[in-house]
Image: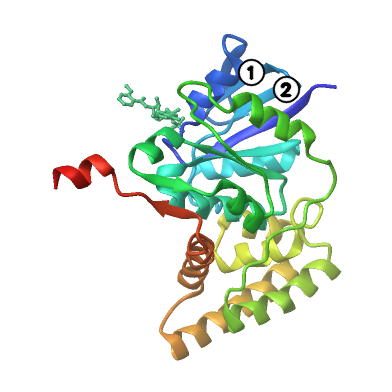
C-alpha cells in the first residue's frame, strides 16, 4: 500500500528542494480546499518503497496565528500521515527545533531531515545527529537536499518506523501553567472535548496560547466546557501577571526555547575553528 508522508518545516529550511529531490517530475501543484495556499503533492519512488509526498506550507509555529499554520496543522490532523518529516536547517538549529517540539507535543509521528549539513560543515559546525536523535527520541537523518544526499537513508528510516501511537512530548511550563493544564486535561477528557481530533493536554495548551481556531471549534462543540477552560486560563493569567509580571504565551514560548537550549547544551553542537582561518589571523 502506498504510504503518505508530509514535509514540514520553517520557510527556507529546504523543503521545496527536498520535495523536488524526492519526487522529481512526478509531482503536481494545486490548492488546499477553500484557500489560496499552494499544495504540492508528488510520488517518491525510493529503494524503501513508494510514498505519496505532500509539501506543507512553511511555518514557524503550529498555533493558528497564520493561514499557513492552520493549513499545515489541519492537513496533518485530518489526513493522519504515516510520518511528519520535519526539515530542520542544521545551520539554524535552535529556531528550527522550536517547531519540532510543537509537532512532538501534538503526539505526531515525526522524524527530522537535518538539512543544509554542507552549510553547517562549511561554517565549522559539527552536529552529533545520533545524540540529537537519542535526546529527542525520534530519528534524525542528515541531508543535503540540494545534491540529494541522504534522501535514500531518509526514506529507509521512514519505512522502518513502527506504526501505532507515539509518546507525546510534555514540556514543563512551570508550576502555575502545569497545574492549570492538569486540571484542564481532566475537564477536556471527561467531556470528550475536541479529543476526537486532538490530545487533551494540547487542547489546554492552545487555550493558553489563545488559538482562535481551537477556541472556536471548542465553543461550537460545548460552550460550557469552553467557558470553564477560559476561566482557568483567566485565573492563571492574572496570577502570572501579579506574581511574575508575565503572561502565559510568553512563558510557553520561553519554556519551549528553554527545552531546545537544554538539548543543545548537551554536546549536540561542536564548533571547529577553521585551520586556514587560524593561520591567516
Ligand atoms: C536558493 N544545502 C544548501 N547549500 N542549500 C540548500 C539545501 C542544502 O542542503 N537545501 C536547500 N538549499 P527551499 P523552503 C538560492 O533558492 O527549498 C537552498 O522555503 C538562490 N535561489 O537551493 O526553497 C535552496 O521550501 C540563490 O536556495 O526552502 C534555496 O523550505 C542563491 O536553500 C534555499 C542562493 O530552499 C531555500 C540560494 C535563486
Residue 149's spot in the image, x, y percent?
Answer: 53, 25
Q: Quadrant of residue 204?
A: bottom right
**Which of the two marks, 1 or 2, is nearer to us in this view?**
2
Residue appearing at x 78%, y 62% in the figure:
193
On-image quarter of the N terminus? top right
Is 91 on the left-hand or right-hand side of 140?
left
Q: Quadrant of residue 192?
A: bottom right
Q: SS of the residue at dot 1? A: strand
Q: How far is mark 1 from mark 2, CA to CA?
A: 8 Å
Residue appearing at x 74%, y 54% in the figure:
198
Name the disc covering residue 51, or none.
Answer: 2
**Mark 1 highlights which residue?**
42
Q: Is residue 116 visible?
A: no
- Indicate which quadrant contains ligand 1: top left
Q: Is residue 193 above or below residue 156?
A: below
Is 5 on the left-hand or right-hand side of 90?
right
Residue appearing at x 76%, y 36% in the figure:
82
Residue 37's spot in the image, x, y percent?
Answer: 51, 30
Amino acid at each position: 500500500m502506498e504510504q503518505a508522508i508530509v514535509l514540514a518545516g520553517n520557510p527556507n529550511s529546504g523543503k521545496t528542494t527536498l520535495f523536488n529531490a524526492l519526487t522529481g517530475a512526478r509531482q503536481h501543484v494545486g490548492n488546499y480546499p477553500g484557500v489560496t495556499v499552494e499544495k504540492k503533492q508528488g510520488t517518491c519512488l525510493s529503494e524503501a518503497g513508494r510514498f505519496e509526498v505532500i509539501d506543507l506550507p512553511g511555518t514557524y509555529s503550529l498555533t493558528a496565528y497564520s493561514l499557513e499554520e492552520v493549513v499545515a496543522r489541519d492537513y496533518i490532523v485530518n489526513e493522519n500521515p504515516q510520518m511528519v518529516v520535519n526539515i530542520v536547517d542544521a545551520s539554524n538549529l535552535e529556531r528550527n527545533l522550536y517547531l519540532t517540539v510543537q509537532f512532538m507535543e501534538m503526539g505526531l509521528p515525526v522524524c527530522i531531515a537535518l538539512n543544509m549539513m554542507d552549510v553547517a560543515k562549511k561554517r565549522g559546525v559539527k552536529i552529533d545527529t545520533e545524540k540529537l536523535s537519542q535526546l529527542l527520541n525520534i530519528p534524525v537523518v542528515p541531508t543535503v537536499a540540494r545534491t540529494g544526499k541522504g534522501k535514500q537513508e531518509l526514506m529507509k528510516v521512514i519505512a522502518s518506523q513502527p506504526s501505532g501511537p507515539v509518546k507525546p512530548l510534555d514540556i514543563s511550563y512551570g508550576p502555575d501553567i502545569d497545574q492549570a493544564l492538569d486540571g484542564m486535561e481532566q475537564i477536556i477528557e471527561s467531556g470528550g472535548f475536541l479529543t476526537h481530533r486532538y490530545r487533551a493536554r494540547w487542547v489546554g495548551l492552545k487555550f493558553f496560547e489563545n488559538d482562535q481556531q481551537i477556541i472556536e471549534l471548542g465553543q461550537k462543540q460545548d460552550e460550557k466546557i469552553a467557558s470553564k477552560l477560559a476561566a482557568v486560563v483567566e485565573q492563571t493569567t492574572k496570577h502570572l501577571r501579579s506574581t511574575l509580571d508575565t503572561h502565559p504565551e510568553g512563558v510557553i514560548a520561553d519554556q519551549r526555547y528553554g527545552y531546545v537550549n537544554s538539548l543543545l547544551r548537551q554536546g549536540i553542537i561542536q564548533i571547529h575553528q577553521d585551520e586556514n582561518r587560524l593561520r591567516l589571523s
